[in-house]
Amino acid sequence: MRKILFLFLDLMGRWRKCWLKVTGKTMADLQDQRIVSGQAWSEFCDDLKSAGNVLLSPGAPGDPFQQAEGIRYLSRLTRAGLEAFVEYNDPLFPEFRRMVHETVKMGADNPDNYYMNAQISGTYEYKIIGKRNTVDHISFHTQNGNYGTTGGLAPCGRLENAALKVEEDGSFEIYLGREPRGVNWLKTEEATSMVMVRQTFMDRFSEQPAELQLINLSAPDHPGPLTAGKVEEGLRTTSLFVGGAAMLFTRWARGFKDHTNKLPLFDPSTSNAAGGDDSIIYYHSYWKLEPDQVLLIEVIPPACDAWNFQLNNFWMESLDYRHYTISINRHTAVCEADGKVRIAVAHQDPGIPNWIETAHHREGTMCWRWYRLHEGAEPVEPLCTVMKLKEPGRNE
């Protein structure tokens, strides 16, 4: 389906170029016409309507609760897309925004992460001015493409926490460009379209995220006038983002059902193409529990900087972590004397530490992450067992 969609868009683009050549008009002329006539808006609405077909795709849940979450999910993606690609889509004057947060979620968004994105261009050079503050870990990434393109999000440059040079007062500067410059450099390429910042908390209630400002080193004093072409392109990218992201992660969730209530290793190349961090080892899967069941997850963590586990709904949105305990990490977990971690996923409190609440859900997706394994350490697949609540000897 996705390949057919992009083939159609490619053919439409070729037809448009031929039409322009025959009529002697420019692309700007066509965009002006499409905006004035309302065609650009109408097609945007039609594309959003088509994106809704993901709600009825094979394997998608059909009950009212999960379908309502699906519609809300699409509305959230639309809100995020419009903000990113229409409101803040000027690479001359970029701004860091929280595209994913408490009420916009996708792709197993991590409750321990404070995500920030900005739309940039490989044509320009930029500088990030920041103050480190107290967040446990911070990393900077440049990406080529977006969720609405055939290549997805391809990794480009990366600057990790340990490599970041910070002054005594906590301040730092990072140069973004194609060639190395300064003490902190983040690589860009011609196709670079986004800079992403991941700040990872051990305790998101007490740690303070970094303060960041992104500056285009060759920007004019003021932005130019809004153009029809910029608005049309923003609408088009938004609709592709909504449809592409929804289609991608729904396909993932459908595949995870093949190993329900297990946590096998997820293909790193697949996660990287969707904007994942290649220093993290992911275990994505599906969970499904009856009212009287508990999913017990046991593991002795390997030597690594951090780890976390979380529950998501079918649409791969993290569950509501504002009001429920739906995730756990190295800092918040209670460990046994031998270092083993036992986590209980259940609809009601099973009476043991490390309870993960299902927040009114009976099924969904889940994710375990190992962050930056230490030298010589090997990743470990968590052991998953489904049992009855209060089964003697295991979860009393």
Image: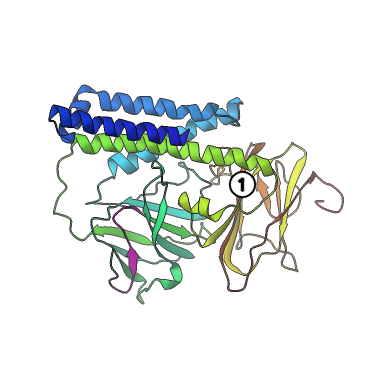
Q: Quadrant of residue 60?
A: top right
Which x, y percent locates residue 40?
27, 28
Residue sitting at 37 percent across and 39 percent down?
A: 81
User: Where does the image place residue 127, in percent across and percent down from the top left?
Assistant: 27, 63
Q: Nearer the viewer, residue 82 or 358?
A: 82
Q: Is residue 48 magenta?
A: no
| Magenta-drawn stretch, dominant element (helix, strand or loop) | loop
Is residue 94 visible in the rendered structure shown here? yes
Element at badge 1?
strand
Residue 78 appears anywhere in the view: no
Q: Residue 192 colored magenta?
A: yes
Residue 7 % position (x, y): 39, 34
Say whether residue 237 is left or right of residue 252: left
Check disc 1: other Cα within 10 Å, few if <14, some if 14-19, many if 20+. many
The boundaries of the magenta stretch are 180-194
Q: Residue at x 57, y 43 (%)?
A: 319
Which of the 4 image quarters holds residue 166? bottom left
Q: Which residue is mark 1?
A: 366
**Type of residue at label 1?**
Met
Residue 6 in the figure: left or right of residue 301: left
| 322, above or below 70, in the image | below
Q: Is residue 287 above or below residue 302?
A: above
In this view, 14 is above or below 271: above
Looking at this view, name the residue that lies furthest to the bottom: 168
